[in-house]
Image (cartoon, rainbow, N blue to C red):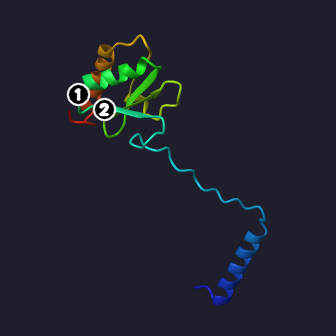
Amino acid sequence: MRSTACKVELMETATSRFEEMPHAIVVIPEPEVPSQGAAWPNAIIAGSLFGDLSAVAKELYRAVQHYPVTAWMNADADVLYQPADGEVPAIIEWIAGTYASGASAADIEDDLNQLCAQRRAMGMIEV
């Protein structure tokens, strides 16, 4: 066991060494990227993989008539979309697709059904 004098000396040495570093930088890690369940400023919820996929596809089809969109699901099985020129905050495997004016509602619905089947097969959702 060290004596009290030895402990004080070690503390003084440690303190003086710290004080010798005038430009010490404290790095605070940046927060992690929000999960896919988080709100994204430009994202619009078109529906849910638990709901009527035909209605979700029609919502996406309506949006595509104005601008290209990228659609994806989040961890809650919501189907979101936003303009395709924006950064999509999604896990790549959760993206349903990127659609432009040539896309049909039937094609979009097929992609949503495929996404739903993949998530179900992986045990991520129960539909």
Relative side of 54 to 89, left or right: left
Residue 75: x and y, percent?
A: 34, 39
Q: Is residue 3 visible?
A: yes
Residue 112 image-quadrant placement:
top left
The front one of 127 and 9 is 127
Q: Which residue is mark 1?
A: 52
Q: Which residue is mark 2?
A: 47
Query: Which quadrant does the C terminus fall into?
Result: top left
Q: CA distance from mark 1 to mark 2?
A: 8 Å
Query: Which quadrant does the N terminus fall into?
Result: bottom right
Question: What is the three-letter code of the residue carrying label 2?
Answer: Gly
Circles 1 and 2: CB distance less than 8 Å? yes
Image mark for residue 71: none
Residue 78 image-quadrant placement:
top left
Question: What is the three-letter code of the residue carrying label 1?
Answer: Asp
Which residue extends farthest bottom?
A: 4
Crowd class of label 2 (few under 14; some 14 to 19; many from 20; radius 10 Å):
many
Residue 89: x and y, percent?
A: 47, 35
Q: Is residue 98 visible?
A: no
- Marks 1 and 2, the one that precedes in the sequence: 2
